[in-house]
Structure formats: structure tokens, C-alpha cells
Amino acid sequence: MSKNELQFRTEDLTLEDVGKFFVETEFDRQTIDVLKSKKTVVLQGARGVGKSFLLKVAQKEMDEEFPNSKTLAVYVTFNKAGLLQTSDPERFKHWMLAKICNRIIREARKKGVLQNKSSVFATLSSGADDEAIASRLETLWTSLEDAWKNDSAPLETDSGIDPEMIKDAVEDLCDQSGVRRIALLIDEAAHVFIPEQQRQFFTVMRDLRSPYLSVKAAVYPGVTYFGDSFQMSHDAELINVNRNILEPDYLASMRQIVIRQDSTLEKVINRNGAVFDALAFASSGNPRTLLKTISAASPLNTTNAQRVMKEYYRDTIWSEHSALADRYVGHNSVIHWGIDFIKHEVISTLRRGSRQAGDHDKRVFLWIHRDAPAAVKEALRLLCYSGILHEAGTWVVATRGLTGTRYMLNIGTRTAPEADPVSATNQLRGSISIKRFIEFGANHEAYESIARLDVEKMDEVQQEYIRSQLDRSVDLLDLTAFARKKCKELGYDTVRKILAASETDLQKAKQVGPVRSRRVMNTATAAVMEHLSG
């Protein structure tokens, strides 16, 4: 289809790329303007919907407007927060504060509002200049990230700072440099499946708020724990990032998302308009999913689109969700129950209704009673994280005046089981009503197998599992027999021991140079990271 490679992830894009690929909708503009405002914001959306992209667009615009607006955008990613799973509750807090403060100093230096040897942030480090403080904080948060390699080693965890000190330092920076305020854009803010970290983050987010500093945080739906001290209605504005597939300009904007990345695709998309529209509609407003399926369907035609829809929405999307059970064993039961529930209760019911009525059942929404078991709600929240469902209203009134939560089913999963998913998807378009949904009451028989599951104990199981990954034998790693043998000769017979060593240590073995030592280290790191990253 094209010689150009479509980019699926924002972290692979420069700010210049972000500006070039941005397709603005009314919702996007409203969201970006709020991100640039003084408001504290929680940006919520499933994987791939564009949270990071919107943060980056806001950063780019604030950078360009800085000479006039004097609003300093500071982008921070917490994507390595999962490395800080530890018995020390303070470790994550100080890692977070150190990283935030370091990024503020670095960004202020880049914009020229902190001069050499200045000491605006001196209160954070016994009068040292800002550059020395930034360097010390960077050393602290990187050492905290690396501490998971050897959790028993002694480690300095206290950054010596707290939110009040950061607020005072930011106010001093603004007073002395002419900066009006700082907008802190935090990506991957609340790492999935680590509730204690999430509660700590939102407490800090609330405590950092001031006339000179506002926090905007990107989080996942359904799996974010705000804690008792953070109240969304009082402490932040919640923005759900979901492209409305029923909007009149939905298909046009999705076309532009692809064409902006590769203009050579415009002709083939126009020539196969119905095929593209089916893929765009099936993606349910998720740009990453659309880009992946368009790329996989190259060259774009009906046959390839049929194949890709069957592969992705019948298999891939479910296997990706199922893989969460391998990483988060505490949630194993609810993850697999959720898959069975959607496949065999929801989708099968819709298909059965279509056959009996002699027409396609146009429903794509389901409704769950507010008193459904906690494990059921947990399963549905995890499906929202994966993009198989998305929440489409709370306290929705159903039959007999009962209230519950409405969810929209991913369109691709709804139509992929059909013999001709492209046609089935296009037939569904224009006939969907948010008022029509399948209802599941408080005690539906489908809940029976997990109704008594204790959700609170899931995270305890998870912590034990992470530790078990570090104790895996080198024999279980994807290494050559030669590499495994050399690791054992040096006494590095577990993942933990390899990670506690350095590449130089590994090179002490005969015939192991920089290349082999790097491969061993990368493999060991990957063995743990795949179980730490959501």
C-alpha cells in the first residue's frame, strides 16, 4: 500500500511530528484548551485512544506560545513507576517528587528562565545551585528505578522534598523569572494494578495545586484508584477521551489521521472508501487500532480487510486482554470470566437475536445493574482498560426504573464473528441507538462463577508473583545454551542475580563481550518488565 511506515505510538514521534499528524476535532480543541488552562485535569482513556498525543499537542502549543503567554509546559512520564513495587511505601513518593522537580528545573533551564548558578530551588537542597539540585534528583530517581534489580540492597529513598517545598520553589521561580505559571503534564500517571502508588500520586496531585502550578494527568479507565483524600468532583476536572463514533465527522477525521501520516494512502482510501470506513468504525474511535489494522490490511482491499478484521477482532484483541492474566495473576479469574462473558453472553446473544428476528440486531450497548457483584464490575473495568468496552454512562435507568452502568461494546468484536465482517460493520453504521442495550441484572446467572471472588486479595497475590519473576532460573530465559552456561559459571543463575550485576560483570566470562553481555541483560530485563508494565 505504501512505502511509509505508520507510527502507532506517540512516544515514537517528535513534537514536530505531533504537530504534523494532529487532526483537530471540536472535542480535541476543547480538551487541549483545558490542558493549557489553570485547571487540574485527569485525562482518562483506554490504551491507544490518544491521551499521550493530546498531552504532547498541548505541550507543543504552550512551547510555541511561551514568549507571550509565559506558561511553562513541563512534560513528565511515569511509565517506569511499575519498577518501584516495594515494601517501602515512601520509595514511590520520593521517586515521583524527585522526577517532577528535576523536570521542572530542566525545562526552565531550556527556556532560559533559570540562569547559571541560580538558586531558585535552593530550599530543596541546602542552598545548592539549581543545576546541582537537578543532577542530584536525577541520580536519586534513576537509582530508585534500578533498585528493583536488588531490592535488598541499602538505598537512599528520601528526596528531602515535599509538595509544599515544590510549590514554594515554583512560586519563587515565577516571581523571579517572569513565568506566569507552570502546567505539569504527567503521562502514565497512575500505573495500572498498583493501587497504593495510585493513591499516593493523587494525594500529591491534590497537594501540588497552587496559583502557579497545575497538574494534568493521563490515566486508564476502570483500573485507577483515586484514594480517600482525592475527590474528583472537588479536586480535578475529569475528561474522558473517547471519539464518538456517532458524530457526523467521525469517519472524515479518522481518514485524516491516516492520511496525515502518509499522504500516498489518500487515493487508495478514496478508491476503497467502504472498506476503510468499516475498519474505522470497527476501531471504535481508537486511532492506534485503526493505524494497526490499516497497516496490516495493505494493500487496502475487501479481501485483506476481511482477513485483518477476523484476525484482530476474533483473536488478537482477546489474546492481548487474556495476556493480562499472565502478568497480573491476582486478576486471573476476572480477566478470563470477562472474556467469556462478552463472547458467550453478550455477542452470542446479539447474534442469536439477529438470526431469530431475520434481521441484524443493531444493539452494541450493554447495561449492568449497579448492585452486580464487585468481581463482575472489576472484570468490566479491565475490559475498558483493553478497549473491548468503554463506559457510556452511569446511573442509567433501564427496565422497571432500575439503575446501572451502560457500556459500549467495541464494534469490531461485535461484527468480526460474521462471515463478512466488512459488510456487517457497514450495515451496523447509522442504525445504532444509545437507548437500546442488553440488560444484565444484579443476580444474573452468568455471574455465578465469580460472584464470591474477593477483589481485595488480588493485589496481594500480584506482589508475590512479581517477586517470583525475579527468582526465575536462567534456564527459563530465552538465551542461547552458551549464554546460560556462562551466566551459571559466574554464579548468575537467577533473573535477580543477573539484574544485580552489570554488563561489565558478565564480560568476565570467557568469550563474552559487549554484544553478548547486552543481550543477556536485555533478555533478563524483558523477563521482568513484561510482568511490570501494563
Image (cartoon, helix red, strand yellow):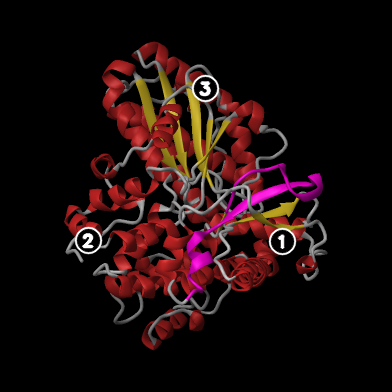
Give the residue at mark 1: 458
Q: Cα distance, mark 3 to mark 1? A: 36 Å
State the image coordinates of residue 497 (x, y, percent, origin top left).
51, 70
Mark nearer the N terminus (2 vs 1): 2
Q: In which quarter of the image is residue 90?
A: top right
Residue, disc 2: 271
In this view, the residue farthest toward the front is 358
Image coordinates of residue 201 in percent, x first then y, are 59, 39
Q: In which quarter of the image is the N terminus?
A: bottom left
Dot 1 falls on a residue whose secondary structure is: helix
Q: In which quarter of the image is residue 33?
A: top left
Residue 402 counted in the magenta span: yes
Kindly report which numbered mark, 3 or 1, lies closer to the viewer in this rendering: 1
| Amino acid under disc 1 | Met
- The spot of residue 104 in percent (x, y) is 40, 30
> Which secondary structure, mark 3?
helix
As drawn, the label of residue 167 is 3
Q: Residue at x 39, y 20 (%)?
A: 119
Q: Which residue is drawn at 52% across and 32% down?
A: 41
Label 1, residues with CA under 10 Å away: few <14, some 14-19, many ≥20: some
Identified at 42% across, 39% down, the residue is: 76
Q: Nearer the viewer, mark 3 or mark 2?
A: 2
User: 40 or 21: nearer the eye?
Assistant: 21
What's the CA distance linking mark 2 and mark 1?
Answer: 50 Å
Give the magenta-colored segment's residue range. Answer: 390-418
Q: How crowded is mark 3: few (under 14 residues within 10 Å), some or many (20 or more)?
A: some
Q: Which of marks 3 and 1 is nearer the N terminus?
A: 3
| Residue furthest out toward the bottom | 481
